[in-house]
Image (spheres, rainbow, N blue to C red):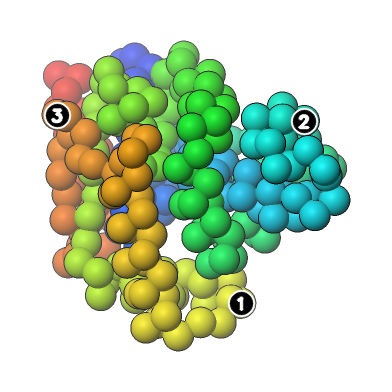
Amino acid sequence: MAEKPNKNLIITIDGPSGAGKSTVARMVALALGYRYIDTGAMYRGVAYAYKILCDVRKDSDNMEQFLRNLPIRFEFENEARVFLEVEDISEKIRDPEISLLASKLSQERSVREYLTVLQKEAGKNGGVVLEGRDMGSVVFPDAHLKFYLDANQDERAKRRHLELSSKGIQSLQSVVKDEMQKRDKDDSERKIAPLVIPEHAIYIDTSELDARGVVDSILNVIFESEE
């Protein structure tokens, strides 16, 4: 296996919450020496800002105006860092309440257009692994390689529950599963950029695989495409 692809690829990894996208995308990017773009963090960042600032800014009812004045900044390397004004909110955006609000706001056309522009700019020169829900279907439909990760709901809820617990966020696994089902429904049924398996994407069921196994499968495809 070669040490690194010969060109700066645009690689997208889509799928529902709990399928392992973030962990896998981060590991793939690290193996390739690419930048890891966590687009879910971008939606959560906007959601967190909306929740915090909507009570103190009179113009927040107008979403386009709110976004135009939004003092948010994203940094992407091995980890996504999100800053609201000067505060690092990278951990605060992982709260389940923020995830649900992010799903709701993602149905707003102005929010999607605002973040799609930023995502296209972040990935346009290649050498990136972009993870999200519409990376291969909407943002980069012509990506060099596209993957879609999935897993059964019980396994996804278990993984999400463990992730939250590791961050000190207490929640029942049954509640996590209910919230995940709601978000799946919202994401799949929204009119704008719904969650779908992108055309030509490679589907991987991660239910019985650990992160390393999924990463190895993806890397094999990437290096085979370069031969």
For label 1, the residue is 168
**Residue type highlighted by circle 2:** Asn
Residue 115 visible in this rendered orientation of the protein: no
Say how many tags the image has.
3
Crowd class of label 2 (few under 14; some 14 to 19; many from 20; radius 10 Å): few
Residue 222: x and y, percent?
A: 23, 30
- Residue 98, above or below 121: below
Identify which residue, 174 or 145, lies in the foreground: 174
Residue shown at 42% from the left, 80% from the top: 175
Asked if residue 56 lies left or right of residue 218, the reply is right
The C terminus appears in which quarter of the rendering? top left
Q: CA distance from mark 1 to mark 2?
A: 32 Å
Mark 1 and mark 2 lie on one chain; the one further toward the N terminus is 2
Closer to the N terminus: mark 1 or mark 3?
1
Q: Residue at coordinates 16% horizontally, 29% vertically from top-left?
A: 199
Q: Which residue is mark 2?
A: 69
In the picture of the structure, the residue carrying the numbered disc 3 is 200
Q: Is residue 215 left or right of residue 199?
A: right
